[in-house]
Image (spheres, grey):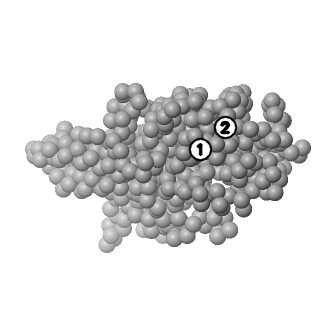
Amino acid sequence: MTLKLYNTLTRKKEEFEPLEEGKVNIYSCGQTIYLDMHIGNAKTYAAWDILNRYLTWKGYDVFHVQNITDVGHLTDDSDQGEDKVEKEAKDRGIEPMELVTEQVQRWYEEMKKLNMKRHNVNPRATGHMVEMIEAVEKIIDSGYGYERNGTVYFDVMKFYEDHGYPEIGSMDIEKLKSGAGGRVTEEEREEKRSPLDFALWINADPEHIMNWPSPWSEGYPGWHLECSVMSSKYLGERFDIHTGGVDHLFPHHPNERAQNIAMNDLDGEPVNYWLHSEHMTVEGEKMSKSKGNFYTVREILEKYDAEVLRMFFASSHYRKQVDFNHEALESAESNLEKLYNTLWNIENSNGGEKENLKEEIKKLEEKFEERMDDDMDTPGALNEIMKFAKKANKNLDNKKEILREAAEKIQELGKVLGLKLDLEEEGGKIPEEAVELLIEIRDEFREEGDYDRADDIREVLKNAGIVLEDEGGETVWKRK
């Protein structure tokens, strides 16, 4: 089967062909590390985590780089405003690098909880100043960079005349030209050859804390430059896949692409496939702090298990806008419980003599791959797993080895979607006899009217993945 990906550059699905047979290089735009990761960030990172996992499952050797931005990302995403890291550090009354150290640690912790694979490299902008200054010099030498009062700009109109503007998504250069004047200050308008030009290196104001020496000024790099430099350093001048959110469609990724072409003197494309993840809404509205619907991963994990979040992310296509709400999370939790119950039912079944599931296992893998090959159709792939789990539950009289193979296939494909499906983590080591004994003790407490201690036992079992249901004076239990 052939994987097809929607290439935002060409605005169509294309068959995936790596530059080097058997190997895939991916660059993902990562976290600006001044606040905790929010659920929208997590949705995007989960999409690229699944991409990595799926390509690995298909047999590719994947090298995945995701950067950490710790300087240069200004509050309006262009050449104006304060540095986001520096502003947050000032608000907290701490040094910028103290903030960064704390936030990087929290980011790694949350990524681990969400079962995200570790990237091969997580380069930080502040660790690549030498390379960024060298890149600016190359762009100036190529004729596409110029200096004004210690700030170096990229000459967009010259690049447009020579190469055409590097569109990603749908953009009209003439509309951009006519509308750009309102996005620059009077001082910038005097400095820039065109309002579209963007900063490669910024001359720091005297009160700016984070700055480095360069041939032009004591300053700091532009946000767009950072990704061009780090992707080229770790993946080469040309690589396979570049990913990000739809908020990167303009201006970040077009500017990044222009820089790559200019600084590396390329005739063709620096990246073969550009992939973009859609935004997430919260209860039907755009997520924002002012609306009170801005949620961090840390906050959500206080209420829901991390695997429920991964199930929720897998339930929506990366290019579709998805709404984050209580009902959607409850649905994800219910579907996850169904998969775990199937695995428990298989493990506790004595089996039989039937063999009809064997062919269904083969069909499951084929259908799963067919869905995923269609531009990472994770909801379709997940649906195939859910349908198979339902069949497996109805055919527990198959031979034990076939049931075991069915369980392993559910786990294998679920892990491609970022699920753990680990029975041991869900209380699988608690013997059935121990559960029954605790239920007997609980019943005794209830008969004595000691409901607090009875509830304590229920809670202990719940935390171990055992759910109690009191039906008609009798307690029944199941593993969750």
| Front residue (pair 336, 220) | 220
Position in image of residue 473 (x %, y %) = 33, 70
| Front residue (pair 372, 296) | 372
Marks 2 and 1 sit apart, C-alpha to C-alpha, by 11 Å
Q: Residue at x 45, y 68 (%)?
A: 327
263 versus 299 height, above or below = above
- The kind of residue on which mark 2 rests is Tyr
- The kind of residue on which mark 1 rests is Glu
- Quadrant in which the N terminus is drawn: top left
Disc on the earlier residue, 2 or 1: 2
In the shown orientation, is residue 209 left or right of residue 36?
Answer: right
Q: Secondary structure at mark 2?
A: loop
| Front residue (pair 393, 451) | 393
| Front residue (pair 146, 42) | 146
Position in image of residue 163 (x %, y %) = 55, 41
267 versus 294 height, above or below = above
- Specify few, some or many for label 2: CA neighbours under 10 Å numbering under 14, 14-19, or 20 or more: many
Across the whole image, how many numbered discs are drawn on residues?
2
Q: Which residue is mark 2?
A: 144
In the shown orientation, is residue 380 left or right of residue 104?
Answer: left
In this rendering, the label closer to the viewer, 2 or 1: 1
In the shown orientation, is residue 465 left or right of residue 37?
Answer: left
Task: Work out whether residue 168 can be spotted.
Answer: yes
Position in image of residue 154 (x %, y %) = 68, 42
The image quadrant that residue 185 belongs to is bottom right
Q: Residue at x 43, y 32 (%)?
A: 24
